[in-house]
Image (spheres, grey):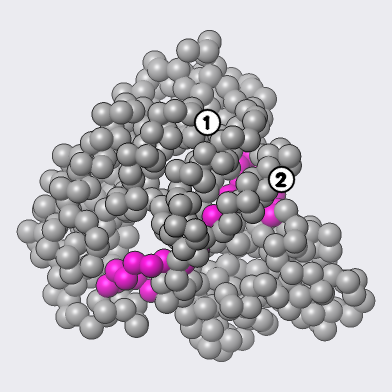
Amino acid sequence: MSGLHITTLGCKLNQFDSADLAGALREELPLTSDPGAASLIVVNTCTVTAAADADARQILRRRRRENPRAVIVATGCYAERDAAALRGMSEVDLVLERADRPEAARMVMEELARRFPGTVSDGCAGRVVGESLPDFGDRSRAFLRVQDGCALRCSYCVIPAVRGPSRSVSPDVVVRRFRSLLDAGFREIVLTGVNTGDYGRDLDGETALPRLLDDILAVPGDYRVRLNSVEPRCVTPDLIERFIDDPRLARHLQIPLQSGSDDVLRDMRRNYRTADYREVVSRLRDRMHDIGLGADVIVGFPTERESDFRRTVEFIRSVPLNYLHVFSYSRRPGTDAADLHSDVPPDTIAARSRRLRALGLEKARAFRRAQMGVVHRALVMRGRTRDGYLRALTTGYIEVALEAEATENEFLPVRITRVDDSGRAFALPAAPA
């Protein structure tokens, strides 16, 4: 029994954290997809909702059933928010809070050495996360953390308390790590953060996300850079110009909406209103017809009335979004919204969520069908779908099933030929546009 198995829940930032830990341990414990064969199992948790907490506990119990002998480690945002709850689980051997992350590799290896004497080298226990290239497994896409923490104080969100204030990675360090990922063979690199658009505000007063993109895109090569979620007020004219100027910056943005009701946005303490949001996404669509635009939406906030929900539906229908990530509101202890009385029954929240997810599918299907016949530059990803198709990802974040053979981890011009009722897109190689 050897190797490291990691289950990552939640956001792309968690995926980077997992890869960072895997990179620090790769010499002693190579990644394995089989939890039953691993000597070390890490569950990197999310705590954005109560359901996320429950998922983490369920997976920890499942991993123990699958592998009674392994060292099981819980880390991530749930571990930071409520380490005591995870330490109270009999299935968990070690809880790594986020404050412990610089010493995570050492702590993990010490636990392994204690449990399995002689199975790890003495030197590995002294290694720390960040010294090695992150290990994303056999993938074409990598994640690169450029920022962590959040300066916003939305009334429903526990993440600022968990991840701390907004902190930016030095641009020199970002570019150095970016080059290392390119050298390792990754063709698409996703810049991640809790509030990526806030990048640089804690640095020299001059560095901001558009300037960081200039530094990154000055690196020569055939690659693609993709931004993670960016807050509406951070989608500035300068940022939009970067999308226009360099095709290596993927034409895709996820811009959190949360509600289409100004009353609810005020209660959520969001720093924009629906008119601001409409202006941002409309400007993006006017400048780039092929850009993929997504939004996060929260359903069932305590003050969300039926009229507020109707406004949200009407607003989403009226703006050029292409997909939705729908979340049911979850009371998080320690947030201001946790003290609000809610008149929204659980079955109403469930019904509203279903309706918004159906609307999201409708908009995604329409966007993909509108792109039929258009030539897209897509990255052929490693691995196949369960029914045997190669997968490719376009600049606008449309994943297509290729109905032909192609070289993995290469860019390929493709033409979408059909989109089924589930929104799944199929494509064939095409002559360059």
Q: Answer whether residue 163 is magenta in the image.
A: no
Q: CA distance from mark 1 to mark 2?
A: 18 Å
Numbered label tally:
2
Front residue of 152/260: it is 152
The secondary structure making up most of the magenta span is: loop
Q: Is residue 164 above or below residue 217?
A: below
State the image coordinates of residue 427 (x, y, percent, origin top left). Answer: 48, 22
Label 2 element class = helix
**Which residues are drawn in magenta?**
134-158
Q: Could you tell me which residue is drawn at 14 percent across and 57 percent down?
A: 261
- Residue 297 picture quarter: bottom left
Q: Could you tell me which residue is drawn at 63 percent across and 61 percent down?
A: 18
Q: Is residue 154 above or below residue 257?
A: below
State the image coordinates of residue 156 (x, y, percent, origin top left). Answer: 29, 71
State the image coordinates of residue 94 (x, y, percent, origin top left). Answer: 66, 81
Residue type at numbered disc 2: Ser
Image-based side of 18 in relation to 278, left or right: right
Image-based side of 71 in relation to 220, left or right: right
Which numbered disc flags the more N-terminal residue, 1 or 2?
2
Q: Could you tell me which residue is drawn at 22 percent across and 47 percent down?
A: 277
Q: Which mark is residue 180?
A: 2
Label 1 element class = loop
Q: Is residue 34 above or below residue 332?
A: above
Q: Which residue is mark 1?
A: 248
Image-based side of 135 in relation to 59, left or right: right
Answer few, some or many: residues within 10 Å of disc 2's Cα (few below 14, many 20 plus, some between 14 and 19).
some
Front residue of 60/366: it is 366
